[in-house]
Amino acid sequence: MSITSLRDLFPFFSSEQNQSLIYFDSAATSLKLDSVIQAQNQYYQFNTANVHRSSYKAATQVTAQFEQTRCDVQTFIKANSPAEIIWTKGATDSLNLIANCLTRSDLLDNKGSEILIAASEHHSNIVPWQALCNTLGFQIKVMPVDKNGVLKLEESLQLISENTAVICIAQVSNALGNINPIKPLIERAKANKALTVIDGTQAVAHMPINVAELDCDFYVFSGHKMYGPTGIGVLYAKLGILEQLPPYQLGGEMVKTVSFSQGTSFQPSPLKFEAGTPNIGGVLGLAEAVKFIQNDINQIETVEEQLYKRLIQILTGIPQVKLWGDTDNTICLQSFTLEGVNVYDLAVMLDEHNIAVRVGHHCAMPLINALGIEGVLRVSLSCYNTVQELDFFEKALKQSISILLDPGLDSDSSPTPE
Ligand code: PMP
């Protein structure tokens, strides 16, 4: 498939209002595939029925599609069984489920009382663990980063001991794009009988995932960062662990029997963790996103590598730019600050050129504080972006910087998109 036809799969670009918009904020949420939108529409317009309940044809068909998607996700991340795939609202929901259920399980009983968290984690992989620590009297230990925000592997490995109960780390940092060395951390954690929670939210759209090979205990991600719908996410966990966890929420469809006199018995996983009517449209949309990534991952990787190279060429050509993270070990995302320029002002100026970027702490306040800065400007690219967009970005960026460095300059001469 050519790059143009890849871009054609995203109806976002066909709207007039988006013709001149440059979307460089895919790490916040990606654009949606037409096939994802169509699958959701099909369900809402013509195939509406609830799942796992009624026995008429339309309902059993939707249930079959819904469960097929679970198998598709199992194949996508190379899990051993569809029972290891739990539908959630997103990565945040998945991480809350893990921390909440672990708090109420006896899985942590014979372990240490330290939760190891990388300094670069998204708040979603910090705050639920703080709650667990408050309830259980555990402590958080922070796996440190260097002055560029890259995980210090040796020091992190040293922190893992028989006192470690759980280690929590993203496969890819959402703030800086670094690919973390999760494999040696998982190995060391296993040797110390600690549980491993991997946040794959920023990884799944950019690289093949193999949870069996990683041998992590938990892996989470959100549909909306991988060309899919919002409000749908995945929790993968090893079946043996899921069997030992109590349910997360309680209600319909997660029960086997309910009786006022005898109490309630629960379904096995995955239904045990899916109380109430799930996001059926979201699951059916996600199926299309998974199909796209699985079929086109090689092309996605090739395109994104080219785009990232050009982005780095642009940024390294500007003397005031300070790049954060590790440019040799990253997804197509780059965060930077600028000497003498407030990146918040720069983001406003880029917006005037119709370039959408994100600036701030990126829900990773501990990381930004550790780096001693107030925020970074993040350019996050995806397979639907183009080199032409980057060429325009270069002009807009240089012009904005020169105005911010010398506010006396005329700002009227905007570059025009090619
Ligand atoms: N983890 C990472 C690494 C993320 O990038 C995000 C979203 N920015 C989350 C967790 C939370 O995802 P969601 O908001 O979809 O629950």
Image (tube, helix red, strand yellow):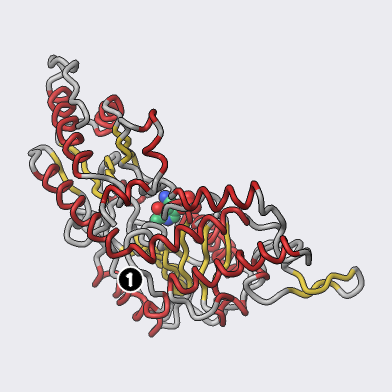
Which residue appears farthest toward the bottom when viewing the image?
A: 191
In front here: 159 or 303?
303
User: Residue at position x 39%, y 28% from top?
Assistant: 17
Q: Is residue 400 above or below residue 185?
A: above
Q: Is residue 261 above or below residue 276?
A: below
Q: Position of residue 202 (x, y in %)?
A: 37, 57
In front here: 257 or 191?
257
Quadrant of the image occupied by residue 293: bottom left
Which residue was labeled with disc 1? 182
User: Residue at position x 49%, y 52% from top?
Assistant: 36
- 94 left or right of 193 in image: right
Q: Is residue 29 above or below residue 149?
A: above
Q: Position of residue 270 (x, y in %)?
A: 62, 71
Residue 77 in view: yes
- 201 left or right of 240 in image: left
In front here: 133 or 190?
190
User: Residue at position x 28%, y 65% from top?
Assistant: 298
Quadrant of the image occupied by residue 304: bottom left
In front here: 39 or 201?
39
Q: Quadrant of the C terminus?
A: top left
Residue type at mark 1 is Ile
Q: Position of residue 335 (x, y in %)?
A: 25, 46
